[in-house]
Amino acid sequence: MDEVSVQRLEQYQYLVSYAGKFSFRVAIENGVTYIALCDLAGCCGYICGTRIAQRSNVPKVKISVRHKGGRSVGKASLMWFLAIDDAVQFVRERAMDIDFKDWFIGYADTLRNLSESEPKGVIASSSCPVQDQPKAPEAQPKKGVNITPEQIDKLIIDLLELKASIVSA
């Protein structure tokens, strides 16, 4: 399958691309292969994969990843990941793109084996200096309500967007 490229992002993290139009991050932790949920949701046809990742009730774990592009180059953040079997089930039930669905389900065994050996065709990414994550100050206990006006505004906007999408459907 020459349409698939695997690029190493870090020691146990890869970027898998298929046919130049789908790509998702893969992480290997404790011998288990995980797929980034927001990337997978985007490949399945969802416009906002990050919201799907935050709100879906599938079994998921948070894994630290370093950003390679954009404003946050070199900074680490936590992302939601699915175990490979849960990812296959997610794609089987939710994929809107049949080409991606058929390919991903067929390619899942190859992804499972990434933890056992170095994948063929891995392209080492160019190393750029990575900044250490700054230490956050210790949290001080707050009295009263622990929600900010910005968080309330964000919740209201999310609810209005949800209502608009339901009304327009």
Image: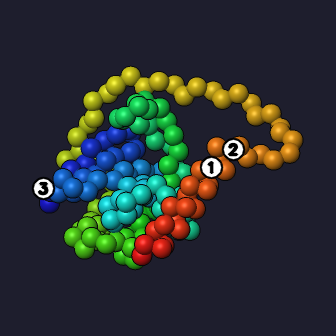
Q: Position of residue 80 (x, y in %)?
A: 50, 54
Q: Is residue 85 visible?
A: no
Residue nearest the observer in this picture, 5 or 135 = 135
Specify whether 125 is left or right of 149. Answer: left
Mark 2 or mark 3, which is nearer the start of the sequence?
3
Residue projecting furthest to the right = 143
Image position of 131 with respect to 117: above or below: above
- Which residue is disc 3 drawn over? 2
Specify whether 163 is left or right of 6. Answer: right
Q: Position of residue 11 (x, y in %)?
A: 39, 39
Disc 3 residue type?
Answer: Asp
Residue at (19, 47) in percent of width and height: 121
Mark whose residue sits in front, 3 or 1: 1
Counting labels gives: 3
Q: CA distance from mark 2 to mark 1?
A: 6 Å
Crowd around label 2: few <14 · some 14–19 · many ≥20 (10 Å):
few
Q: CA distance from mark 3 to mark 1?
A: 47 Å
Mark 1 or mark 3, which is nearer the start of the sequence?
3
* Residue 153 tag number: 1
Q: Position of residue 109 (x, y in %)?
A: 31, 66
Q: Position of residue 67 (x, y in %)?
A: 41, 37
* Residue 149 tag number: 2
Image position of 148 with respect to 126: above or below: below
Helix, strand or loop under label 3 = loop
Disc 2 residue type?
Answer: Pro
